[in-house]
Amino acid sequence: MTPPIAIIGAGPSGLTLGRLLELANIDYVIFERDTPPKPGLERTGTLDIHVKDGQLALREAGLLDEFQKIARYDAPTLLADSTGKVIISLGEDRDRPEIDRKDLRSLLLGSIPPHRVRWDSKVQQVRRHSEESMAISFDDGSVESGFKLVVGADGAWSKTRRLITSTKPRYSGMYYLTMGIKATNPFHSRLAPLIGQGTYLAMGGGKQVIGQLLGDGSFYTGVGLSSLPEDFDAKTALADPSAFRERLLRDEFADFAEEQRDLIKHSEGEIYPWPLYEMPVDSLSWESVPGVTVIGDAAHVSIPSGEGVNIAMLDSLQLAQQIVQHGLDGLDRAVAEYEKMMLPRAKKHMAAAEQGKLLWAPNAPHEFLKASRTMRLVVLGGNGRTGVHLIDRALGRGHQVAALVRDPSALPERKGLDVFQGTPQNLDDVCKAFRVEGHPAPDAVIVTLNPSRATDSPLARPMAPPRFMANSVANAITAMRQHHVPKIVVMQALGVGDSFPNMSVWMRYVRHWTYMKHSYDDHDLVDEEIRVSGINYVLPRPPWLTNGEAGPVRTFGNTGTGVGNLATVSRKSVADFLLDACERSDWDRSTPVIAS
């Protein structure tokens, strides 16, 4: 019997969707053009998997624990110029662990029954078979029909996307040529300090040299060129890899540092072409087509930006959720709802990927870093139990932090951190944190304050004056206006404002009849202060806070519908969300309830 859903492509997005459908007991089949992967023969680089999308999809797929066992958490990215000078190290202390692409694929493949994947099935055409079913034609002349939904996870040159839009990917003008260096290579030990534990990327003059450490100790290496035409005859040019390496060293990378040239000189074996294509941003606005949809690169291929696989896996998660919600009789509605979420998100991703083109600029990476300059953040409450994590993670992301605290000795000296002694109840003290000599005005304010209590118990007698939170935020807003700071993010709690009805019965009682009432009333006043100010804001409202490690965070709208009575979230996860809310506009002027 024909399964109702066909997925074309057994990459990360197609396999993630398959796994989620498997868990939901929904029948499906995956068609993959390649033969089954053979261990040791796959030539792929690494991927960094992010908490808010890639890891979220893995968690919902029941695979996060297995992923964490094989992921690498100490894998920074070093950006260097062509003289060999490392300009910046990115990624330390960020929860974006690395995994080899082949290992991620193996993890996903191992999570679904083998019969679900039909290997060596090269799709020639996807077409409508009848008013209510789709058909797939294959290169060997066979045809399979009767599918209610065909999901294209078949990459940039998707055969599925042609039923949705006539727009095709366009050549970006950028081209990668990839190679490798085995762990047994006699020059491996010489190159190891250069690449380190993660990724090394040298650039300048529209060219790049890249090296990545893989899980087996070998290096994935390559070069990037912006001088190759779309019709570059790779088959002929790369037929003699040794000669082409000599050509690269002589004609393209003669002025790069010798240790960077060594990544080309000592690479081994064949050289693989990888021209970079992208979908035009304005093409991501189609009307939903019954019986067909696309995920991952099939929907929104772009130049590499570190986000591609993550939003592809989020595509899979959101589509699977809609299919489960609407059922097999409501697949067209499920697709329409999924695409309402996917298309705006894809446009933001494509716009962000544009910034990555600055890594190919003549003076890269300096132009890239200038465009993506780190944020300057003012933090009120930086020595609290959530505030200390916030500062750690903000510095880890490369941001500059000015923290106003009662006791500066509680925060150790660190690069990028300016500490000011004072109280947020005093406007002059608050303004000190906004005026740091030699630094531009802040980009945002984050408040993790909580009224002090007689003990650490949330039920203890309050020690802070009335309106402690409201007055502190009012002072912050005044300073923001003086210094033209556009955004404030304030950590609140489930039960504040519109989220009160979604507290458990027990917590509603506690909120009204214990000392906690004073804190909640103060947070309600904060809500009022911010809304009347006209300043852009995000007011995250977590439930019970724990001291666990960071993990994926879910949002439950502005009121918390569906959050549940036993919801928790770690302070580290809240810290990450507060930073995400500063860096992104997804939650602007909202009060998202968040939980693990």
Image (cartoon, helix red, strand yellow):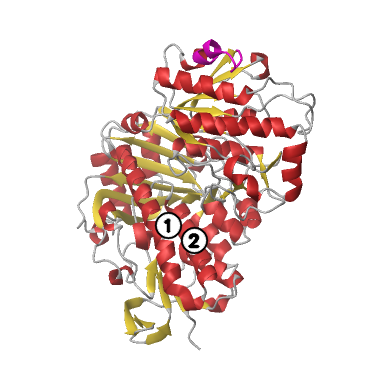
Q: On the image, numbered disc 1 is attached to which residue?
A: 341
Which quarter of the picture shows residue 164?
Answer: bottom left
Dot 2: element: helix
Please indicate, yes or no, whether residue 150 appears anywhere in the rendered image. Answer: yes
Q: Residue extending furthest front?
A: 513
Q: Residue extending furthest bottom?
A: 1
Dot 1: element: helix
Tell me which label, 2 or 1, sits earlier in the chain: 2
The residue depicted at 62 percent of the width and 59 percent of the height is: 63
| Residue 82 at x, y percent in the picture | 33, 32
Query: How many marks on residues?
Result: 2
Which quarter of the picture shows residue 337?
Answer: bottom left
- The question of residue 427 being in magenta is answered with yes
Q: On the image, numbered disc 2 is attached to which residue?
A: 318
The residue depicted at 76 percent of the width and 33 percent of the height is: 458
Residue at mark 2 to residue at mark 1: CA–CA distance? 8 Å
Q: Is residue 322 above or below residue 6?
A: above
Which quarter of the picture shows residue 374?
Answer: top left
Tell me if 390 is positioned left or right of 431 in this view: right
Tell me if 513 is positioned left or right of 84 in this view: right
The type of residue carrying mark 1 is Met
The type of residue carrying mark 2 is Gln
* 10 Å crowding of disc 2: few (<14), some (14-19), many (20+): many
| Residue 387 at x, y percent in the picture | 62, 28
**In the drawing, what numbered circle is on residue 419?**
none
| Residue 39 at x, y percent in the picture | 53, 64
Please indicate, yes or no, whether residue 9 appears anywhere in the rendered image. Answer: no
Q: Which residues are magenta?
A: 422-431
CB-based contact (under 8 Å), mark 2 and mark 1? yes
